[in-house]
Amino acid sequence: MGPRARHTFYGVAVTRAASFAPVDVVARTLRVELAAARSRRGGAAPRVLDVGGGSGTWAVPLAAEGCEVTVVDSSANALAVLHSRAREAGVDAGVRAIQGDVDALADAVDTEADLVLGHGLLEYVDDPAEACRAMAGAAAPGGAVSLLVAGRFAAVLSRVVAGRLTEARQVLVDPHGRWGEGDPLRRRMDVEEIRTLVEAGGQLTVERVQGHRVLADLVPDGVLEPGGASSDPLAELEDIAAGTPPLRDMASRLHVLARRPG
Ligand SMILES: C[S@@+](CC[C@H](N)C(=O)[O-])C[C@H]1O[C@@H](n2cnc3c(N)ncnc32)[C@H](O)[C@@H]1O
């Protein structure tokens, strides 16, 4: 297993692998999607549009895996960081950065994408339904839209273990899953909310809803049994838990893969 960094989850000190693989089910889902896109395109590089791609958390590794990535983000600062990360990784030729808003996505990009990412975006936009419509419109026929959004129930649990019961109650009952006026997120969602939102525009069909790092972040330091060379028990467990309600539903982030009909 790669280097791990300390952090807390549900208030418990735990560790996190510095790289996504192999525990990250979202990264693995995207790899399958991109392999299919490459095959549809006769071996040509898959075209990825990363909306709200920020400093390149997803864009840079995807470019390193041979995708042509366009990042549209409203923040000039984030795009400056993206440029330097892409340069450091030696993939700047594979990453195009455009400063723009998801509300005007059609004006910002001139090509269709095989895969459109909206990771950590819907929590911030004015109108999430409009953002989903814009991302769906940017996907090629048969292409996919991948969304990662903050989960409501994980936020309830993390506040309970921190003793912040008023906030926990508010996240649970608030129509947008916010804990109060000071909440930096404009919304959190549960599985039904995100599914309904994505399909409401009529352009996309949800193919998969899974939890992102449902259990991996809960494993305390030093307790993992050493795995064999050919298996990673945590990755295998995470794979199952990611799609198993109610564990899935309590993930800190929910992942949706939706498709535009071909
Ligand atoms: C939480 S970061 C997510 C970054 C990255 N996608 C990730 O998963 O690590 C949210 C990003 O969305 C961008 N953003 C927020 N509102 C936006 C909008 N209306 N249009 C385009 N980008 C937006 C922000 O500038 C920021 O870079």
Image (tube, rainbow, N blue to C red):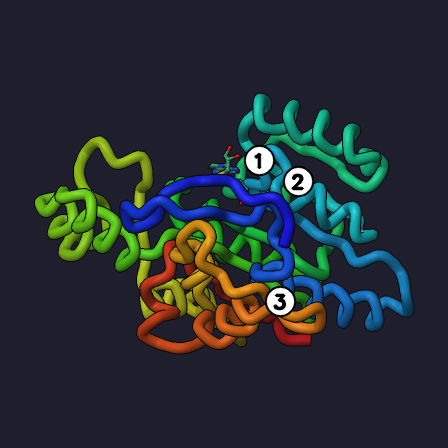
- CB contact under 8 Å: marks 3 and 1: no
Please state which of the two labelled residues, at mark 2 or mark 1, is closer to the viewer.
Answer: 1
Q: Amino acid at mark 1?
A: Gly
In this rendered view, identify the residue nearer to me: 81 or 129: 81
Label 1 secondary element = loop
- CB contact under 8 Å: marks 2 and 1: yes
Is 134 left or right of 36, judged from the image as shown?
left
Kindly identify which residue carries mark 2.
71
Q: Residue at x 44, y 52 (%)?
A: 130
**From what the image shows, is residue 165 above or below residue 56?**
below
Label 3 secondary element = helix
Is 193 left or right of 74, judged from the image as shown?
left
Q: Residue at x 66, y 40 (%)?
A: 71
- Specify whether tag 3 is near ligand 1 (CB below 8 Å): no
Quarter of the rendering occupied by the N terminus:
bottom right
- Specify whether tag 2 is near ligand 1 (CB below 8 Å): no
- Image coords of residue 239 (percent x, y): 53, 72
How far apart are labels 2 and 3 at the CA level? 20 Å
How far apart are labels 2 and 1 at the CA level? 8 Å
Picture disc at residue 54: 1
N-terminal-most mark, 3 or 1: 3
- Specify whether tag 1 is near ligand 1 (CB below 8 Å): yes
Q: Residue at x 20, y 49 (%)?
A: 161
How far apart are labels 3 and 1 at the CA level? 21 Å
Kindly identify which residue carries mark 3.
29
Picture disc at residue 40: none
- Image coords of residue 159 (percent x, y): 20, 47
- Badge 3: few (under 14), some or many (20 or more) residues near its Cα, within 10 Å? some
- Image coords of residue 244 (percent x, y): 40, 77
Is 92 left or right of 1, judged from the image as shown?
right
